[in-house]
Image (tube, rainbow, N blue to C red):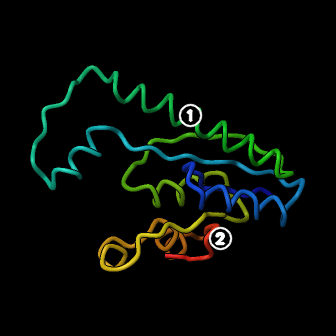
Amino acid sequence: MTILIAYDGSDDSKAAIAFAGELFRGQRAVVLTVWERLAMTSARASAGLMVALDQSGAEDEAIREAMTELARRGAEQARQAGLDATPRCDVDSVAVWSTIVDVADELDVQLIVTGTRGLGGVRSLLLGSTSDRVLHHAHRPVLVVPGPDGKGD
């Protein structure tokens, strides 16, 4: 069995790793961190307004390196939780949730494990959550683990 664990370094994603380790000790896991290019982040933040960006790519490279290290730390946490884990870091193609679903399809994993994120209220209604979108668009089982405070989205 291979599972895909979505990991962003949040307490919720750490809880997802810990729970997956309890349930699936010894199983193969890919710990996936998805990152967004600076240009996409800026474009979304400015609600469609053009933003002058350094086109050298140095910022994106720094983000990629930091996210790769984050994936490594997540895989190490998963190994400590009893999983046979490897890290993976991908840039998002359209949205974080779609990249998670695409990687799950590419690897043909048996299960996707993700934590919840507490958007709450109006923001959750307007934007939805990554875990909710993964749950509704994945072509395989999804385990959504509540955060350490016990509250979901």
What amino acid does circle 1 point to?
A: Thr
| SS label for mark 1 | helix
What amino acid does circle 2 point to?
A: Val
| SS label for mark 2 | strand
| Figure check: 41 above or below 150 | above
Depth check, mark 1 against mark 2: the one in front is: 2
Spatial CA distance of label 1 from label 2 is 23 Å
Q: Residue at x 64, y 67 (%)?
A: 148
Q: Position of residue 1 (x, y in %)?
A: 82, 59
Dividing the picture into quadrants, the one containing residue 56 is: top left
The residue nearer to you, when weighing 18 against 131, is: 18
**Residue 105 in view in this figure:** no
Q: Position of residue 76 (x, y in %)?
A: 74, 40
Q: Residue at x 66, y 55 (%)?
A: 14
Residue linked to disc 2: 145
The numbered dot on residue 32 is: none
Judged from this view, the residue extending furthest toward the front is 149
Dividing the picture into quadrants, the one containing residue 119 is: bottom left
Q: Position of residue 18 (x, y in %)?
A: 75, 59
Residue linked to disc 1: 68
| Figure check: 54 above or below 72 | above
The residue nearer to you, when weighing 121 against 132, is: 121
Q: Residue at x 90, y 53 (%)?
A: 26
Q: Residue at x 15, y 56 (%)?
A: 47
**Residue 117 in view in this figure:** yes
Tell me whether the residue at label 1 lies in contact with that at label 2, contact meaning CB atoms closer than 8 angstroms. Answer: no
